[in-house]
Amino acid sequence: MSDEPADELMRATYQALCKHGYADVTMADIAAESEMSKSSIHYHYESKHDLLTTFLDDLLASFTARLDDVEGETPREHLSALVETVLDPSSDEPNREFRTAVLEMKAQGPYDEAFRSRLEEFDRTLRSHVSDVLAAGVEDGTFRHDLDVERTADFFVTVFGGAQTRSVAVGRPVEQTRETLERYVETNVVAADVGVEGGQ
Amino acid sequence: MSDEPADELMRATYQALCKHGYADVTMADIAAESEMSKSSIHYHYESKHDLLTTFLDDLLASFTARLDDVEGETPREHLSALVETVLDPSSDEPNREFRTAVLEMKAQGPYDEAFRSRLEEFDRTLRSHVSDVLAAGVEDGTFRHDLDVERTADFFVTVFGGAQTRSVAVGRPVEQTRETLERYVETNVVAADVGVEGGQ
């Protein structure tokens, strides 16, 4: 199988998840969004679960590539760009259905070992990207020398998860969290002699 | 119908949700955990959706009562007790299944108006309890006079949601978030002349 049909199938899976949600989506729904027949999909993937696991792998690869592409002149700008990538306000609406499907898949973590290992990998990837930027800022002196890099990165990942969950559950815009995190960076991350006002 | 069988049915619904999860639970599963027959449950509740909506109402009432019962000698202690109630580390394991079911229900927010309105009420209730305590601390001078009470309360609710989502999805203990929030209170909420070290 060349990469082409695989990519096309991943796009079809994305569309079907947006339309039907994780719990209700079927192989037939995915086939309907794709140029492949249901039997041809079944030839490559034994079950919906197999296909969705591959989809999560694919999603993780593109998420990692997207985070790798984020850059900034300084650690501070790099961190802001990272936060903006994860909490992209413009994606509140178009991606709403997809985020909902992702939240449904997160709720499968305890039941599903294959999903669980991918969810852990998303969590780790995000955390390591944040901690690399934080460490770079400590290194060049723009972030507090005594910053607990690992704990702070972990906190960011918790805040990202909360913003995404609330966006799905109660429609709260992720934008508000982005602004609050910006202030958090100002008061708790940036070194006192570098911040605009040196914190509050 | 007296309160007794209703309470018993809510307990049975809780048990059935823990065992089967939201997506898979059936009226028969709930009946199996209860002393009521399936037909007697159907007499009171037209559908599983009706019963689960009532269950969410019941859950919201007991959650509100639990938050109302939280107290502390000072706003600072009150706030810590509130955080501890929401992020109760002892509940990581026993409540894991239930939290998972709640996360599944959160993922129904966009599709289900009845669930959505209850989820919004949970969000509002939590936020208002946090903001009341923050306002009391600003009032008595133990918290920063320039604290943005509403924004900070909103941030706490986001962090709670993130801790709960990560606990379900990747098994990360909520305890770590509780500790980080304690530090956040120390550095960003408590007035500079009140904190142990006056913040970092």
Image (cartoon, coloured by chain):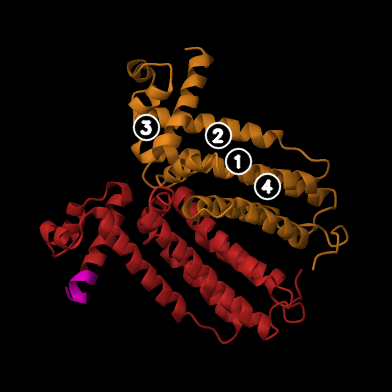
Chain colours: A red, B orange
Q: Are marks 3 and 2 on the same chain?
A: yes
Work out whether mark 4 precedes mark 3 in sequence or the reverse, and give the earlier one.
Answer: 3
Discs 1, 4 touching: Cβ within 8 Å? no
Distance from disc 2 to disc 4, alpha carbons, whole Å, reads 17 Å
Residue at point 52% right, 15% down?
B4
Which element is circle 1 on? helix
Which label was assigned to residue B112? none
Q: Quadrant of the C terminus of chain B?
A: bottom right
Foreground tag (1 vs 3): 3
Q: Chain of mark 1?
A: B
Residue ID for mark 2? B60
Which element is circle 4 on? helix
Work out whether mark 3 precedes mark 2 in sequence or the reverse, and give the earlier one.
Answer: 3
Distance from disc 3 to disc 2, alpha carbons, whole Å, reads 16 Å
Residue ID for mark 4? B83
Residue ID for mark 3? B49
Where, by quadrant of the figure, is residue B43 drawn?
top left
- Nearer to me, B171 or A16: B171
Residue at point 18% right, 71% down?
A5
Q: From which residue to which does the magenta span run? A: A1-7
Which element is circle 3 on? helix
Q: Chain of mark 3?
A: B
